[in-house]
Image: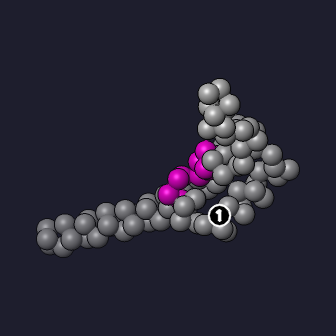
Amino acid sequence: MKATSIMLFIIAVEIALLVGLKVEEQYREVRYFNNCVEDIKSSKIKSDDPVAFCSGLVRQDPYLFTFNKGKVAKYLKENEPQSSEPKSDKKKETK
């Protein structure tokens, strides 16, 4: 009788852990999406609708979006073209 109670307790704990992990996994995606929207707004990236912008990013590469936890503004800034002249040209002019 005691062994049966222990086994049922272990099974109940395992089920609770599995359900908890599934809920956390679903909420994680929402949290990352909210991170993306806030990151786009705070970094002043030109976008009419940050929600649609983040949706597009998720569709383009869901793995990278999840890997970066929704913090994507630093990567978007790296890909923007630089409007200033290259520094190597300035050094040649001074010599």
Q: Where is residue 77 in the image (x, y as percent from the top left)?
A: 66, 45
Q: Nearer the viewer, residue 74 or 80?
A: 80
Report which residue position mark 1 lands on: 58
Res 53 → quadrant: bottom right
Residue at 21% over, 71% down: 7
Q: Can residue 45 be seen in this view?
A: yes
- The amino acid beneath tag 1 is Val
Q: In this view, does 82 lie above or below 5?
A: above
Left or right: 29 in relation to 16 = right
Residue at 81% over, 49% down: 47
Q: Which of 76 and 24 is in front in this view?
A: 76
Residue at 71% over, 44% down: 82
Give the magenta range: 66-76
Does 69 appear in magenta? Answer: yes
Q: Position of residue 17 (x, y in %)?
A: 37, 62
As drawn, the residue found furthest toward the front would be 95
Q: Is residue 35 visible?
A: no
